[in-house]
Amino acid sequence: MASIFGTLFRVSTWGESHGGGVGCVIDGCPPRLPISPEEIQIELDRRRPGQSDIVTPRQEEDRCRILSGVFQGLTLGTPILIAVDNKDARPSAYSEMETMFRPSHADYTYQSKYGIRNWEGGGRSSARETIGRVAAGVVASKVVRTLHPQFEVVAYVRSIHDIESRIDPETVTTAEVESTPVRCPDPIAAQKMIERIKEVRSQGDSIGGTIECIIRGVPPALGEPVFDKLEADLAKAMMSLPATKGFEIGSGFAGSRLTGSEHNDAFVIEEGCVHTTTNRSGGIQGGISNGEHIFFRVAFKPTATIAKPQQTVTIDGEAAELSARGRHDACVLPRAVPMVEAMASLVICDHLLRQLGQNVLPQAP
Amino acid sequence: MASIFGTLFRVSTWGESHGGGVGCVIDGCPPRLPISPEEIQIELDRRRPGQSDIVTPRQEEDRCRILSGVFQGLTLGTPILIAVDNKDARPSAYSEMETMFRPSHADYTYQSKYGIRNWEGGGRSSARETIGRVAAGVVASKVVRTLHPQFEVVAYVRSIHDIESRIDPETVTTAEVESTPVRCPDPIAAQKMIERIKEVRSQGDSIGGTIECIIRGVPPALGEPVFDKLEADLAKAMMSLPATKGFEIGSGFAGSRLTGSEHNDAFVIEEGCVHTTTNRSGGIQGGISNGEHIFFRVAFKPTATIAKPQQTVTIDGEAAELSARGRHDACVLPRAVPMVEAMASLVICDHLLRQLGQNVLPQAP
Amino acid sequence: MASIFGTLFRVSTWGESHGGGVGCVIDGCPPRLPISPEEIQIELDRRRPGQSDIVTPRQEEDRCRILSGVFQGLTLGTPILIAVDNKDARPSAYSEMETMFRPSHADYTYQSKYGIRNWEGGGRSSARETIGRVAAGVVASKVVRTLHPQFEVVAYVRSIHDIESRIDPETVTTAEVESTPVRCPDPIAAQKMIERIKEVRSQGDSIGGTIECIIRGVPPALGEPVFDKLEADLAKAMMSLPATKGFEIGSGFAGSRLTGSEHNDAFVIEEGCVHTTTNRSGGIQGGISNGEHIFFRVAFKPTATIAKPQQTVTIDGEAAELSARGRHDACVLPRAVPMVEAMASLVICDHLLRQLGQNVLPQAP
Amino acid sequence: MASIFGTLFRVSTWGESHGGGVGCVIDGCPPRLPISPEEIQIELDRRRPGQSDIVTPRQEEDRCRILSGVFQGLTLGTPILIAVDNKDARPSAYSEMETMFRPSHADYTYQSKYGIRNWEGGGRSSARETIGRVAAGVVASKVVRTLHPQFEVVAYVRSIHDIESRIDPETVTTAEVESTPVRCPDPIAAQKMIERIKEVRSQGDSIGGTIECIIRGVPPALGEPVFDKLEADLAKAMMSLPATKGFEIGSGFAGSRLTGSEHNDAFVIEEGCVHTTTNRSGGIQGGISNGEHIFFRVAFKPTATIAKPQQTVTIDGEAAELSARGRHDACVLPRAVPMVEAMASLVICDHLLRQLGQNVLPQAP
């Protein structure tokens, strides 16, 4: 279902970049969860434009309001509507989009699919759509943490362009991630990345990169073989984010070059619990979490909208040249970190509820 | 929904590797499609064990029967049940699985999730489950081809272990893929791969690799932003296959190292249609097909079940050593090719029906 | 899915009677449909309080805004958010609801299900929730009418308390329904009903009744056996409305007293089309529309909230006596007419899209 | 989704009356439930033809096999396939159905929807399809009883044609229901019903009736407002059964003639629990179970297939006269009793799992 995500914890997002606003409806949230707009705002602020000098200078406060589903600070178990107004909209900056398709953007495909599109600022394909995801992710994360206090999602920029960072995913903290505006917890690489982003931006160009995400404190038994395997739903979640081109979990593509005896994670008992001595599985085996840390990487392509002149065609089928105006990120990675975290939380929360809704019989039958 | 895939063309698979059989139910298939067990059998034969000397020697004929939903050779529009009996089952070969968890297999996670598991031969986590997917994929593919005769899915082994092949995805044919038992259309690489598989098998070990898939003849406009983007559903489909660790589309992870001006696919008009001069997008932009070829790669880890002794634990929490018996593939890649193709067809067929079910109004409103 | 209705044309409603507002999100609406807030407002005005002297005197303008999914007056194919603010909220009028359960209302069951409830004015169980349904119904109806211009839904009050009306469902028009505030197109019965409602209200009591609905211009072939039969989805739609206790289609309960030879609708050819000489089937056979008029009846119980003193218990388990204050309808039927019509339109629209999304192959295979 | 029912406990049925067989797949069943083919067979035997001299004399043993999802007598949590072969098929008895539409049967609508139909014996619209429902209902019922041992569903024939019975729904037992072949626990009425069925059958005609169903031992809090209210899903479940024309819960249509002060169920505390002194609500308030007995009634029309000559048309649009051959029930009610019970169990089980999957947070937040 196009704009609905999840089986029990269901999020639907709504809104175009230009229009009345954007947001989400959460259907199926457990009742009696304390939640406030302020908690949600913290994450929205990590996502919003204008937060630093390496992201788009658009000035959007992105203030969220909760219009339903919360009463006296607690969730009611009924649909939660979270809304953010569109404020700094400048449709005039997009007037050429009305007639021209930006290369590698969604303009042409939206037009061919729907026969119409809101050409003001990307419309539905704008990253503003992810505001609803980030807001819902805060709620999802809090549900999981209430039941599993060790639960924690930490994503960070692992590479930008050809700049690779060195980060220990086992120990990295959100504080380290937030210590630089580029959200790369390796300070030396971070500095290079910031410079590269500014340089590329000054050239009217853009760059991509990779984000790594580690999820700690996930109990064993989450994930639903055969189609809704945990890694399958994580892959879908990440590949549904704008500008993503790849997903790999645990050993990933590099794991395809190992032998079984090199790759397999040996089981041991530690403090009475089953653990693995290595974690090439990335915390998921057979589609089900095994209690180890879950980690995966997501590839993002360079932003499609660039100031450099590009060859394209018009809606009437004429060849044209386009130099995009408007205020765009030269690199989406820093702002994509909270998006990745939010989608990860949505997947884990939904699968936690699903497991609690199926594993209901007493252990010894 | 754990064992149901798709929104309009819905496939549910059923069955364990040991038990009455395996198969699928297809709900929502368009009526009046000619389909026969023989057509389905062709693809099942590409998937079945014992087809060559580099795959598991288990002798399973995997003969399919259609028990419902087809009348006088045509689909009725009602649920189609396709069943394959389990024949060459030797539960005794798996007796140690009753008490021990194979490293990096699904034994431990199934036990922790369900509190029970069919330990005879992998049960539900066995690759036998994919019989239902391959059978359904044949039907899905034929639906799409009826409406878009150019539609074609060609997957092939691109690498095994560290052996890379050189293949032109634009021109590769199924006949070339089928010309070697390893399903790599580069004959020189194929020969090396075959030797490597035999070598690794003789060592009681296993290896992984990558499969590339190209989908031709997909019309523009398929894919449902924002969550059911075409690449998101392809990613989920592939990551739901056993042993997959990564998915990338178009430029993939390598694309994250390019600039926007290098990466963007310029639009041109050719023979009155919009096309792109390059295809780093992999045929999908903004989650919607753009009419170019769709291509993606999937990483498979080495088979978890190996004959070499491995450290593990028992169901009672005791340390143990396991040397797997049974007849296992030292490399799943050759048999995974039809699985990848089937899942690709299921995704395209479902999105085609969804597009036809939403894009119903006359063009000029 | 609790607050999501439909498979392809999916409506989710959100909002409590007291709080930020109420409304709906429509996901999956076909693109390029002309739609305006003004069109939606017409139906919301038929539903709103204070429209006549026989409904609740609450003053709610119920002005709707479209915040997303519509661009330059046309649907985009993306989620449509429709919102109505809550204005005339007087939580003080409900203060006793905080601690007492109204007999036969949803207070106790919401508390036992969610462990919390918005006790201000009924919260989610308030009839204000149906604003989102009525708004979505306008859009659904217009989709169907664009493809089937003869499509028309006419509901009307058939009985109130023991006052039965005489109405010919074949010929009744919306204008006739709207000619009296009670929405019963039999003027003599309507007058009696109005008097009865006023009389009962003056006694601090309430009354129920039945609504009949006729749907014209539905093409044959809508409805999805075996579970999503058209009458099954209509029944669910109607029984999901507040205060409904029964649903019957065509001959209904009375049909259970006939013999097959009395009940069967003979087929004939009229103007080259298959028709039936009678219509005890109510326009649906085997779960699929047959092209005849669809008609059904819905039973509504008397409003639960009454001014007369009633025996009840408090949230702390103490016996108590409750005399409800607040401004309630003594009879919900007049305002329920547009709700019934809206739900009927949602069902027909969803099934129309589903049929167009499955029946895609050429007729002669 | 046409042939899939339920959100967490999902049942899909497959099969036509003539063809390889019929059955169901259950996806999402809790693991570790003891279940055997013998338990399922008990209910299938209550549904099967030939069980007494007032039902169709077709000889179908309807022996069920479990092909997957059960291991050593316990459910695995994976899809459960239950299959029944078609044996006593006589397509020749239906040869005229190939070209003629039976009045008020599904022949014409299936043909108009799918452009094809299995005309041998009703195909998918045959009551044989309900075998899968009855089998799944046994599993669902056992899941609920494991968690709520007081859970019990008792349905019975309340009326046939104009013969009404007198039954106390509070005390009626399955043993009483099973004491007569007509499944009416009022012995005097039962005798009249049996005679009436035989009389009507000898005339080549058929009759309908009503079934009442009482569900005991349902805990409070089941049902998901606003669309998946418990009575809404029960209504859909019942109206998806063949030949149903109406559904009413609690006071039903008669309740529409009462005042609020007559209709409301007063709350009292009994043994520390909230109860109601009357039960016009039928055990559901605001869409959620309140812990009282749930009861409802379902209207069935007379069997459409009758031996008496009827006016109809052929598939080529010619007027024709049809006198059905074949072996049909003159009254479906006795065999419909286990179908009603099965659908009730499916609804309760699914909603129980849904509640357990949402109500997961500790009570005091």
Image: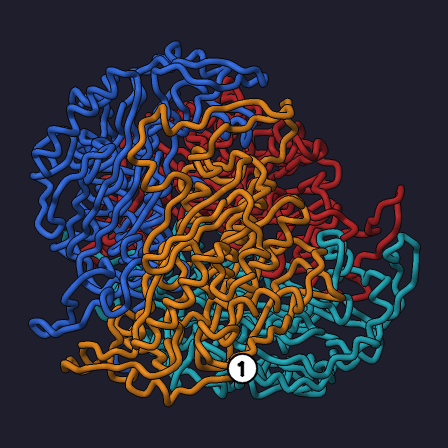
Chain colours: A blue, B orange, C red, D cyan
Is residue C340 in view? no
Is residue A274 in view? yes
Q: In the rendered image of this protein, does residue C260 appear above or below residue D193?
A: above
Marker count (numbered)? 1
Residue D131: % across, % down: 59, 75
Query: Which is more toward the observer, D304 or B255?
Result: B255
Q: In the rendered image of this protein, does residue D195 appear above or below residue A155?
A: below
Q: In the rendered image of this protein, does residue A251 appear above or below residue B328?
A: above
Tell me the residue that label 1 is attached to. Answer: D43
Query: Which is more toward the observer, C196 or A152?
Result: A152
Question: In the figure, is residue C178 to the left or right of D230?
Answer: right
Question: In the figure, is residue B16 to the left or right of A194?
Answer: right
Q: Quadrant of residue A12?
A: top left
What residue lies at 57% left-to-right and 41% top-to-bottom?
B218
Q: Residue furthest top?
A: A92
Q: Residue furthest front?
A: B188
What residue lies at 34% left-to-right and 38% top-to-bottom?
A244
Residue B124: % across, % down: 40, 72
Query: Which is more toward the observer, B278 or C183?
Result: B278
What residue lies at 51% left-to-right and 15% top-to-bottom?
A99
